[in-house]
Image (cartoon, rainbow, N blue to C red):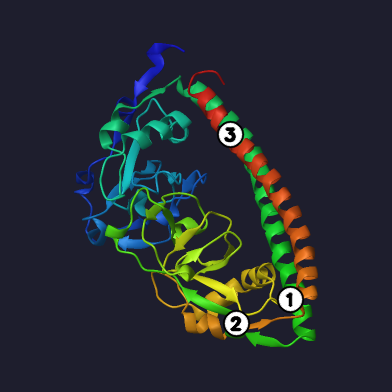
Amino acid sequence: MDKLKIKKLSEVCIINPKKSELGKFNNELKVSFVPMNLLIEDNQNFSSNIIKPLIEVYKGYTYFQNNDVVLAKVTPCFENGKLGIATNLENNIGFGSSEFHILRPKETVSSKWIYYSLKTSSFIHLAKLSMTGAGGLKRVPTKFIEDWSIFVPSPTEQNKIVKKLDTIFEKIDNSITLLEDNLNYSKALINSSLDGEFSALELKYRKKTLAEIVTVINGRAYKQSEMFNAGKYPILRVGNFFSNRGWYYSNMELEENKYCEKGDLLYAWSASFGPKIWDGEKSIYHYHIWKLVPLSDNVSKKFLYYLLERDTDKIKEEGGRGVGMIHITKGNIEKRMMVLPPLDVQEQTVSRIEKLYNLHEKMTKELKIKLDNMKALKSSLLDQAFKGEL
């Protein structure tokens, strides 16, 4: 690669242009307003039908124009790939989130060239490492953007490479869309099959309240001072319910029903909620999790798990409470009506469902590998382009 063609972004772009450019405009001038959610990963261009008077957005928001490249600088928006080229702005002027970095290309580079340069794996990786801030809210510093160096061939060569990337990426994106459609179809098929299985049973067998089938036991609330980075018992919180990250521990000895062990049926009832058959070591389950203990040996935990899994969306609609954090109450869950056929029918139903789930999981795994390969191919092509190798 020709070293003479390596330029800092601050040499080829105006970084975060000043609002003072607008001094000559009337305060009532209509301009476009762009909230963060209009920047969508892999949507190269963006526009907005939200129109506001200049005086309403001048203070507190970020200024840009048509063809400026807009980059979200704050976590998690940066990591989520929020980036785009401004188009069709009212009176050529836009304002948006204060969490935007703006890059206005000079004559030597095109907007698309800068857009693609900000999608390279090296830029994303090192920008993440450069982030500053505390309390979980971190930002890519302006200085990092200014000092970042990119390959800058002639405008003619840029256009050739951009056209090649556009053509290849369109084909890759079409393949990605098809794979994602297949994933959604597979999930929809599972949901439909669960509905079919349990709807047929509901026509034949009577329903009971969940309280007639299981005892619902509350978990234990913890103070931060009671949770440690190491200890005898893991504390199972909602954050650990569907992942294996960020564990805390306790050395407290509690009554036996405050522990969960492998094979126990649990239910997270706050934020991301739903059932789970616990497959880990002996743990203390948190207050936002219930343990469901069958009242008789004629109840299959796996049958009940699938029944609750099928019913999760309905429970959200009927029992949801709160605005910022969805949750359901113990009283509501205990009143849920559940079909309970004889044990042998429960086991036969579970067997059919698990065959379908195994097929679904195999298909999902294969599709996700293909998706990852497609995304890796895009990343590799971008890296080649900005090394002068494409």
Q: Residue shown at 56%/86% (left/top)? A: 335
Q: Which amino acid, by three-letter code, is at mark 3?
A: Ala
The answer for how far apart the CA atoms under marks 2 and 3 are is 47 Å
Sequence-wise, which precedes: disc 2 or disc 3? 2
Front residue of 142/343: it is 343
Left or right: 211 as drawn, with respect to 146: right
- Rendered view: 65 above or below 60: above
Query: Which quarter shows the C terminus?
Result: top right
* Disc 1 target residue: 198
The answer for how far apart the CA atoms under marks 1 and 3 are is 41 Å
Circle number at residue 370:
none
Is label 2 in contact with label 1 (beta carbons under 8 Å)?
no
At mark 2, the secondary structure is helix
Q: Residue shown at 53%/75% (left/top)? A: 316
Mark 3, residues whose alpha carbon is within 10 Å: few (<14), some, or many (≥20)? Answer: few
Left or right: 127 as drawn, with respect to 197: left
Q: Which amino acid, by three-letter code, is at mark 2?
A: Leu
- Expressed as whole percent of the image width and height from the top left, the position of residue 347 reads 77, 69
Left or right: 29 as drawn, with respect to 115: left
